Amino acid sequence: MLKGNKTVPLILALLLVAAGIFNIADPMNLHPDLKNQIWRVINFVLFLAILYYAGGKKLFTFFPGRSKEIETELNDLDARRVDAEKRLSEVEQSIANLEDEKERILVQAKIQGEALKADIVAKAESAAELIKQQAKISAEQEAKLALEEIKAEFAEKVTEAAEAMIRKKLKAEDHKALINDSLTRVVLN
């Protein structure tokens, strides 16, 4: 548009001079509506010149800067889109691998379950064998106790029977001699 510091004031001065001449003398004998229209154009050009002089340079630097910002944002968005697509493909890949992972976990769980089952069975068999041994020992001990009770009872019965027989056959004199003999043995020992 308008460039340079010297041209802007020069153009403004020319416009003002032209407006002044046009207003003072109407050499062309223009129609009032056309005259009004020309004033509007001059006012608009003056307004644009003032705007440019006040902040036009900032406007011309704003729009290219904004364009660069938008371009940078678009490039950033493209990079983010590419990154998102990459992540999406990784997620899709992990989902595809999820089925294989599930199978692997199931196989491992089955192997561990079988090992645990075998361990439990081995421990149960060991415990059962221990219980059998304890039961056998307990049965043997109970049999020994029962046998000893039977022997004691039998000895008691035999002693009672022998005592009864001896009483029938033993006379008082024999009885006294037997007691003295027993007492002598006890004293000597």
Image (cartoon, rainbow, N blue to C red):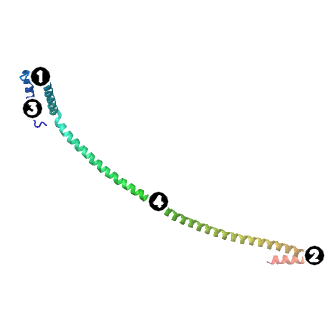
Which numbered mark, 2 or 1, is in the foreground of this view?
1
Of residues 171 and 65, the one drawn nearer to the viewer in this rendering: 65
Kindly indicate whether the residue at mark 1 contacts the one at mark 2 (C-beta within 8 angstroms): no
Secondary structure state at the residue bearing disc 1: loop
Q: Residue at x 69, y 69 (%)?
A: 135
Residue occupied by mark 3: 11
Tell me the distance, in whole angstroms, between the alpha carbons under discs 2 and 4: 96 Å
Which label was assigned to residue 31? 1
Q: What type is the residue that disc 1 sits on?
A: His
N-terminal-most mark, 3 or 2: 3
**In the picture, which quadrant includes the C terminus?**
bottom right
Secondary structure state at the residue bearing disc 4: helix
Q: What type is the residue that disc 3 sits on?
A: Ile
Q: Residues within 10 Å of mark 3 (few under 14, many from 20)?
A: some
Which label was assigned to residue 102? 4
Q: What type is the residue that disc 4 sits on?
A: Lys
Tell me the distance, in whole angstroms, between the alpha carbons under discs 3 and 2: 172 Å
Tell me the distance, in whole angstroms, between the alpha carbons under discs 1 and 4: 93 Å
Which numbered mark, 1 or 4, is in the foreground of this view?
1
Q: Position of residue 54 (x, y in %)?
A: 16, 32
